[in-house]
Image (tube, rainbow, N blue to C red):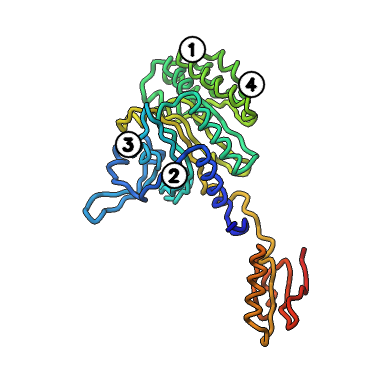
Amino acid sequence: MTLPKMLLKKEEEVIFRLRALFEQFGYKQFKMSKFEEYDFYAENRSFLSCENILTFSGLDGKLLALKPDVTLSIVKNTKGNDKVSERVYYNENVYRVRKGSGEFKEIMQVGLEYIGEVDRYATLEVIRLAQKSLEIVSHDYIIDISHMGFVLGMIEELGLTNSQNEALLKGISEKNIHSIQTLCKEFHVKEEMKSALVSMTSLYGTMDDCLEKAKALCLNEKMKLALEELEGVFLALKANGGSEKMKLDFSVVNGMDYYTGIIFQGFINGVPSGILSGGRYDNLVHKLGKNSDAIGFAVYLDLLERYDTPQKEYDTDILLLYEENTDTGALLKAVEMLTDNGQSVMVLRKNNQTVKYRQLWSMKERGLEIIAEND
């Protein structure tokens, strides 16, 4: 049975298509409970995107938490390792405070994780699937790509403390040039390094335009290797027609604990914040005692609620009127015939003028009759 498209909300249609896409590439669905023991999240708080966690006491007195994150649970339960990789995807709700809302929200996420040896192909596959996921939502999208190795490679040249590095990283993530300059002055950063930080933060555009400029900013082997990886991904995508909507943007960063390599964020026209984010996160896997690497991404489907929600032109394809003496058996048979043909049908005794219809039909003694059309 094919579901009529009109029955699906935008986010529901996207879920079905994303699941089909992920299955096509060998990813298997991961299901989890709505909650985990609170201690698990408390011990790994630095890997969570929000500080607040909804908690409650279980029947045995243990403190439980409504899950604020899915990746942590997947990594905790994964069988993937450096010898055998595991590909999983999920369609789960998480409970967290979304930035700017000030309230807990139930956030619908669909995402995938590749856990195992993350070689060049695995990285490429995940980024390509991120692009395809954005295409499912809208063809009017861009994906910004960065590399934590490149950004941290530059910051490490400054020889600052961790807290100072984090402060600079925050300024970079906000593209706040004034903040970066102020912090550099406060931390006594040399003028040429301040200039390099500002240039790196300001760099934005197509990979073709920006890669050479980024090469000119390389200060050490770590930055050089990061850029080589970015260039390798770009060239492979370019050969397959997937590079046009990719932009280089080193302001796409995260805390120093989480992402370790390539990191990316996806946007679609009409939604003010990123609808997809992901990257490589080996630190988290190692922290949970796994001998593996990992890369993945999540699509935030709650953001689609306000995007491209089509206004239904009609309440029903057919408004079918009948009379008091109409043969109800024949009426039901007629309704089933019409719905079997894929049309929606609403049956009323009288047209109360409140229903928007494409066609107005009547059930007469001699059969069905079209009275009016709005097409």
Of residue 220 and residue 189, the one placed in the foreground of this image is 220
Which mark is first along the chain, 3 or 4?
3
- Farthest residue, direction left: 60
Task: For mark 1, give the secondary structure.
Answer: loop
**Which disc number belongs to residue 219?**
1
**Residue 176 visible, this angle:** no
- Give the residue type at disc 3: Asn
Residue at 61%, 34% (x, y): give it.
142
Which mark is first along the chain, 1 or 3?
3
- Front of the two marks 3 and 1: 3
Alpha carbon of mark 3 to alpha carbon of mark 1: how far? 32 Å
Would you say 175 lies left or right of 363 here? Answer: left
**Which disc number belongs to residue 29?**
2
Q: Which residue is mark 4?
A: 208
- Give the residue type at disc 2: Gln
Alpha carbon of mark 2 to alpha carbon of mark 4: how far? 36 Å
Alpha carbon of mark 2 to alpha carbon of mark 1: how far? 42 Å
Alpha carbon of mark 4 to alpha carbon of mark 1: how far? 21 Å
Would you say 241 lies left or right of 192 here? Answer: right
Q: Quadrant of residue 163?
A: top left
- Front of the two marks 3 and 2: 2
